[in-house]
Every structure is written in C-alpha cells, then in structure tokens.
Amino acid sequence: MKLVLGKHIALPSTVLDLTFAVGANRLIVTREGEPALILDATTGKEIAKLPRGAGVGPVDPAGRLAVVGEAGRRVAGRSTSNVSLWDLAKGTKRALLAKNHPGDDLVPQAIGAMRVLGLRQRKDAYSICLFDHAGKKLVEHALGKVPLPFHGALSADERVVVHATFTGAAQLVDTASGKAQKLAGGVLRIGSDHDKGISSLAFDSSGEHVLYVSHGTETVHVWNVRTRKSLAGTWVGERVQDAFFSGGSLVVVSSGTREATAKIHSLATKAKPRVVIVGHSSLLFAAAGDDRHLACVGFTGWDAYAKSGLEIYDLVRGKRAAKIALPGPMKTACSVAACPGKVAVGDLAGGVALFFA
C-alpha cells in the first residue's frame, strides 16, 4: 500500500471532527466556532456550509444522510434547537425531525438503512423514537424514568435497539413491540465523577454483540445479544483508548508511555489475542471500515514521544502497511477519519489533509 497526499485544505479554527460520507465522496468537517463544512472528499472543494453553531450527528450506512442540530433561541435560560435530516450529496436540508425546547428534547443516535433512531426526554421520562428517512415519526416506545443521560444504537437489521445509561446499565428493546430486556452486568463504578460515563455504544455488523467504550474509565464492555450476558475475555480490566468490532473480533487500541498497541480478540473462541504494535504513544486511531486496516496519527500537542506522521497498519498481517509525513503547515494533529482508500487528518491550528491509498 502507498499513501499519497491528495490535498491540503487550509481552514481557520480547530478541526473538531471529521466524517466520510456518500460512499466516501464527501467529508464532513466540524470546526470550533465556525460553520461545519461538507467537502468533496477528492478535490477538497466546498459543497455546502452548515448553519453556524450546527452540530453534525450520526450519518447513515450509505453516507447519504446526516442529522444536523441547529441552535435556536433561549427559553428560561436554556437553548432551544431544531434537529433536521440533511442530504449530504446535495448539501441541503431534507426534513425537520424535531423542534427541541426545555422539557422536550430529542437526541438522534443512529441512522439505519430505513429508519432514524432518536432518544427523547420529556421532563424525567424517556422514550425511543423511530423516524423514516423523510422525517416522519413511525413509532415511539416509552422507557420510563432514566436517572442519567444515555446512549442508543440500532442493529443493522433495525429490529433491535440497545440503550445504556451514563453508568453503563443497558437494555435491548424490540423495535416492533417495544418490549425491553435487561443486559446483565456492565455497570461502571464512577461515584460522583461525572466525566467517566460511557462514551459510545455499538452493535457489531452481525447484530450478535454489543459494546460500550468509556474513555473516562478506559474501559470496554461486550455483551452477547442472544444470551444478554456479559462476554468474558482478556480485554476485561485492560487500559483502553478506543475499541471497535472488526469482523468476528474485538479490536482494542491503547497507547502507553512509549508504545501503542492494537489487540485483536476473537469473540468466538478463547484464543489468545494477537498483539500488533502500532507506533508511539498518544495516538489518534481510526478504523478504515474494511475489517482490516487501522489509521494512526501522532497526537503531538500533548506528548513529546508522539510522532506527527500518518501510518496505516494491516491488522490481519500484523504489520505496518504504509507511512507518510503530514504536510509542513500542519503542526498538531487533533482528529482523524478513515475509510477504504482514504484518510483525512485535521489540525489543531486549522486545516485538513486528504490522503489516498
């Protein structure tokens, strides 16, 4: 594999997040204090500019739709907002999902091939809402009172939703009947430390497993959907920077004082995990979405041992597949996104570099 720099795009302000969309033909760039941009992911040309203050939420599997939250006016000291579906290919708004206001708040969680999942809070009661891609609400299932904010995820076949509270307690909900079943274990011991809750929640592609990642507690937890029991493995208790499913495996990435590793754990067997050394400490990681490659960028602003180049690792072969230096104007990498054949790196001082493999 050979990496080449396709385009360096100079942008003002810190790049907070990067997302490939529309079959990797679009790149969504979220910036600090500036409107988010939809760029052509090959030429870097601006396709559309989202409203100032708008936040980009989940993107559908085909990468054609995204949820965008737009800030509204303030009511009783709290901000209102509009939640809309946007067509990423055209860069235009498709439909309004909800008008949020104090006491009624919809937070989109995922976009499936057919439906959009949102979690709604009305005062202290919560519910799951499903919309079609035209923005029409199809069904709403009450969840009752939930003590803390939570995350949700939609299975690939859209038959099941998993939702988990801030502390990791989780349930599966049948999207047709609304029947809920608890998942055993997984609760985090965070005490009063409210920056240590779960950060992300996801199904694997088969729908057989669910994981959550807690960046604050450096923890990953996995459940078997069929048995609804926690899955035991050697990753339990390990320090985790991030984790994701890759085929039938769980990949756990972490960076120590001088060395970063990716550990590939089989979910079907009790085989010893494979360990791949993926560079120096304080790295940013992004899975390429092909169940094989991992992009790594040095997080150079916080660690003298981190190196600023971009590296691609082949997790099947256990070797580095490609390496390239970042463009000269980029001083401190702070975000990275990857898809088959493309990698984007964002800079703390502004700017995005597009690389092709």
Image (spheres, grey):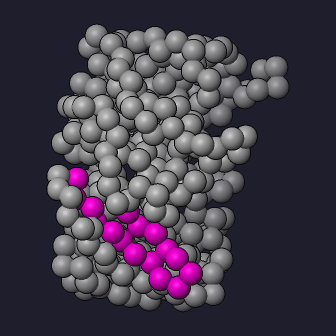
167 or 154, nearer to the observer = 167
- Residue 191 location (% of width, % of height): 69, 41
Specify whether 20 is left or right of 104: left
Q: Residue at x 82, y 20 (%)?
A: 76
Q: Is residue 264 magenta?
A: yes
Specify whether 283 is left or right of 22: right
265 or 105, nearer to the observer = 265
Q: In the rendered image of this protein, does residue 159 appear above or below residue 18?
A: above
285 or 351, nearer to the observer = 285
Q: Residue at x 44, y 89 (%)?
A: 325
Q: Main secondary structure of the magenta part?
A: strand
- Residue 335 location (% of width, % of height): 52, 66
Specify whether 173 is left or right of 102: left
310 or 352, nearer to the observer = 310
Residue range (magenta):
252-267
Q: In the rendered image of this protein, does residue 47 appear above or below residue 94?
A: below
